[in-house]
Image (cartoon, grey):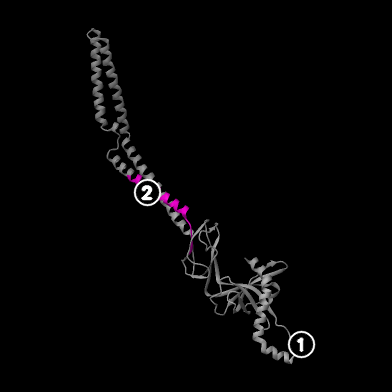
Amino acid sequence: MKKIIICALCVIAGAAAAFAVCHILHQKNAPDRQQQQASASPETVKAPRVLTGYGYIRGRSCTSLKNKYGAYVSKVHFYSDTKVKKGDCILEYDDFDLRQKIVATENSLANLEKELALQRTKLELTRLDPLPSDYRNISWKTYRAKELMERTLKEWNAYKQLYASKSVSELDMRARKQAYEDAHAAWEIAVSDRKRVDQGLRKLHIKQAEENVALLETKIAGLKKELALLYEQRKYYKIVTPYDGIIVTDSDTVHAWDNPGTAAAYIHKVHKGYYIYSYFEEKDIIHLPNGTKGRFFSNDSGKYYDLVSFDTTRTRTAVGDKVFHLVKFRVLSPVDKKVTMNGAGVVLVDLDK
C-alpha cells in the first residue's frame, strides 16, 4: 500500500501540487504581488517556498477486519464510506460446509440421546431383575437338580441289581445309568451357576448397565461441546464492526471468493475527526515539526482543507533514489461528504507563512 502511494507520489504530486500552489497563491496573494512587483525590481521578487506531499484521508485509527476461513461472500449489508455502529454486520460469508457439520452433529446427538434413554430403561430393569433367565431362581433349580440326581442314582443302583439277577436287560440298565449321568451334570451346572450368583453376578450385571449409561452420557457431553464449538465458529463467517466508524470494504461483491486472512473491510474511527497521512521527502522533514500548518487538496471533492501536523514517523521508505517519511496531519476544516475514506490528494505546506 505504501509503495503504491509513494510511486504515485512521483507522478501525481508534482502536477497536482503545481496546480494547487498556483491556484492558492495566485488567488490569495494576487493583490500583494501586484503591489510588490510595482515597487520591486525583478531581482528582489522571490518565489514562495512550498512543500508538497501526496496523502490520503483516514480516521484517528484504522482496524483491518479479516476473515478466518476461505468462503464465498453471501450477503453485503454495508458498502464503503458508510457509517456503522459497533456490532453491525458488514458482510456475511457462505457457511454451507459448516452448516452441514452442525446438522450431522445434531443428528448424531439426537440418536445418542435416544440410545441413552433406552439404556437408562434397561438399567432400571436390570436393577429390578439383574440376573439372566438361566440364573433366575438358581436356589430352586439347584435343589431340583440335586433331587433328580439322587433319584436317578437310586434307580440306576436298583437296575444294576436287577440286571445282576437277570430281571432286566442290559439296555434298560444302561438307560438308567445315562439318566443318572445327565442329572449329575445338570446338578454340577446348577451348583456352578449358584457360585457365580453368590460371587456377585447381580452386582456385575447392574454395574455393566450403569457403565453403558455412563458411556453414552460421556459421548453426548463430548458431542455437545463439539456442537457448541461449531456454533461459535459461525461468528467467523460474519465481519462485524468492533466500534463506531466509517468502513471501507474490498469484499462487496456477492458470490466473490475470499481466501483465509483476506482484509474484507477496514473501519476508521472518526469520532474525534479526520486525519491526513502524507509522505514527504526526507530532506523536507526538518521543515515539518509538530504543529506545522498546511492545506489538503482532495481529489474527491476538489476542495481545500486546513491541516496541522502532529506526528512525523521515523520509518524511512526508499523509492528509487528518494527517501520518504510519513507525516500525520489533523484536519481542522469540516470535511465534505464527497470525500471518501482513503481518498487521495495533495498536502501543501507554505514555508513562508
Q: Amino acid at mark 1?
A: Pro
The majority secondary structure of the magenta stretch comes to helix
The 10 Å Cα crowd at callout 1, few under 14, some 14 to 19, many 20 or more, is few
Q: Is residue 263 visible?
A: yes
Which image quadrant is residue 53 in?
Answer: bottom right
Give the label, 2 or 1, closer to the camera: 1
Q: Tell me residue 279's x, y (percent).
A: 65, 72
Foreground of the two, 235 or 32: 32
In-image side of 294 versus 269 (left or right): right
Q: Tell me residue 106's x, y (percent).
A: 40, 50
31 above or below 18? below
The residue sitting at 70% across, 91% down in the picture is 35
Q: Is residue 353 visible?
A: no
* Tag 1 residue: 42
Q: Amino acid at mark 2?
A: Ala
- Span colored in magenta: 90-117
The 10 Å Cα crowd at callout 2, few under 14, some 14 to 19, many 20 or more, is few
The residue sitting at 68% across, 75% down in the picture is 15
Task: Point out the residue furthest to the right here.
Answer: 43
Which image quadrant is residue 175 in?
Answer: top left
* Tag 2 residue: 110
Q: Is residue 38 magenta?
A: no
Q: CA–CA distance between discs 2 and 1?
A: 94 Å
The quadrant in which the N terminus is found is: bottom right
> Sequence-wise, which precedes: disc 2 or disc 1?
1
Task: Point out the residue furthest to the top here.
Answer: 166
Task: Point out the residue furthest to the left here.
Answer: 167
The quadrant in which the C terminus is found is: bottom right
